Amino acid sequence: MSFSALFAMWKLVLPKLRHDQLELYTRTVQPLHLLTPATRASLVIGQAMSAGVRAVFQVLVIVPIALLVGVRFYPNPGYFSTDLGVIFLSSEGFAVLSMLAVSFLKTRERFMGIGQTLTFPLFLRATPFALWL
């Protein structure tokens, strides 16, 4: 991709970005992914691994907070490492399923619509929302 093509893309997209700053990140990174010599499989594996690592770091933040609040755990390192492995693999699996859905839907708007369709019933089933009603 030449600099003139990138400049033309920025000129067309810039008015849209004033409304949503997160769009700036996704519109900047996406063309860079397309220019890399990496295969599609390596991009999918990399995204899945990053989802797994993010999930493990979330566990490492939440568990000490839970211990401070008074939640009791079995002090078995085997259980903890098994749980970390299950969380890592399940978050990778959900990330891959998400990328599979994106590959079929082709546009961000359709994918976001499917995501909202799946998460809205979960929101309605949530206990705080049910108590509020």
Image (cartoon, rainbow, N blue to C red):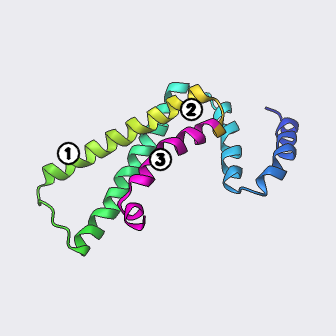
Earlier sequence position, callout 2 versus callout 1:
1
At label 2, the amino acid type is Val
For the record, the magenta segment spans 110-133
For the residue pair 12 and 114, the one nearer the viewer reads as 114
Q: At 49% from the left edge and 32% from the top edge, which residue is drawn?
A: 44
Q: Name the residue under label 3.
A: 119
Where does the image place residue 6, in percent across and percent down from the top left? 82, 39
Q: Which mark is residue 102?
A: 2
Q: At 30% from the left edge and 70% from the top edge, which residue is drawn?
A: 65
Where does the image place residue 80, in percent across and percent down from the top left? 19, 52
Which of the 4 image quarters holds residue 10?
Answer: top right
Label 3: few (<14), some or many (≥20) within 10 Å? few
Q: Nearer the viewer, mark 3 or mark 1?
A: 3
For the residue pair 124 and 55, the one nearer the viewer reads as 124
At label 1, the amino acid type is Thr
Query: In the picture shown, does residue 129 fall above or below 124?
Result: below
At label 3, the amino acid type is Thr
